[in-house]
Amino acid sequence: MTWHDLLLANPSVLFRDCHNTTTNERSVETVCSADKVMNKETYCLFEKFMLSCMTDTAHDKEHVYRVLYNALEIAGEENNVNYDILIAACLLHDIGRKEQFENPALCHAEVGSEKAYQFLLAHGFETSYAEQVKQCIQTHRYRKSNPPQSLEAKILFDADKLDVAGAIGIARTLVYKGIVSEPLYNMLPDGTVSTGENDVAPSFFQEYKYKLEKIYSSFYTKKAVEIAKERQHSAIEFYNSLYQEVNLSYRNGINELNRLLEDYDRR
């Protein structure tokens, strides 16, 4: 069974073994001795570094694992995928989140790619390998000016965006909005609930209209397009239901309040 097959077939066994491994720093010689870069020791080294960097609830280690598993599913439909690069890039793609959270002017993809690059070089990996992993991480964030180029970068991009699609994307966005104390929706000057369509002020509805609703046209790989299409309905249904419920509460409530106040005025 290949390393790829082991991850897909029973990842819990792999993670249990990694977590039970002693925390002593592994030698560069041990990590780099295999014919392929991605052996078990290497995986555990990358995972340990990733875990030390993850502090954001919406972008936690489970998000990283989901991105990895999404990527492996996508890669299974592609040819000539370099799993050494792909697995490393998936594990390390969000290690710059803490810096961006502390300073929003920073881009976590830029920060994380440089951290990953320096980490790989410090642990004895080839410069060319570190550079390829860096480029994947650098382009995983949705930016038209810096699209992914390599197959591995495109797979990482798609795998990460799948975790913004469907029900999981809704849930993660709501968690993040709670962390940064942003509201579910904004109110319009006429007292009605904004759909988020043209909002400038942040909210869940604004994020849905600005990003979540549009994510389904941004995938590169055929498999990711298929998965995203399957998930899209649940996201649309949730947004529409939430907007209708909230809007109905305001509309009915305001009408009833006005009626009661008018009754009081007539007395």
Image (cartoon, grey):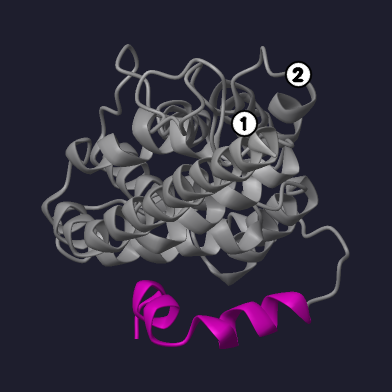
* 45 displayed left or right of 167: right
Instruction: Give the residue drawn at x 62%, y 42%.
Output: 263
What separation in Å lies between label 2 and label 1 (alpha carbons)? 14 Å
Which residue was labeled with disc 1?
112
Q: In which quarter of the image is the C terminus?
A: top right
Q: Residue furthest front?
A: 267
Above or below, 166 against 13 in this view is above
Residue type, label 2: Asn
Q: Quadrant of the N terminus?
A: bottom left
Instruction: Give the residue drawn at x 78%, y 82%.
Output: 20
Compare residues 107 and 196 and report the one nearer the observer. 196
Instruction: Give the residue drawn at x 68%, y 51%.
Output: 50
Helix, strand or loop at label 1? It is: helix
Which residue was labeled with disc 2?
103
Mark drawn on residue 48: none
Let me know if residue 126 appears in the view: yes
* 231 displayed left or right of 200: left
Compare residues 7 and 55 and report the one nearer the observer. 55
* 145 displayed left or right of 102: left
Compare residues 20 and 51 and report the one nearer the observer. 51
Q: Position of residue 133 (x, y in %)?
A: 47, 37
**Would residue 159 be counted in the magenta stretch?**
no
* Label 1: few (<14), some (14–19) or many (≥20) C-alpha neighbours in 10 Å: many
Write the start and end of the magenta stretch as one range: 1-20
Above or below, 2 against 171 in this view is below
Residue type, label 1: Gly
First in sequence, mark 2 or 1: give its number: 2
Q: Which quadrant of the structure image shows residue 226? A: bottom left
Q: Where is residue 183 in the image (x, y as percent from the top left)?
A: 63, 37
Which one is closest to the eye, mark 2 or mark 1?
Answer: 2
Q: Position of residue 168 (x, y in %)?
A: 45, 61
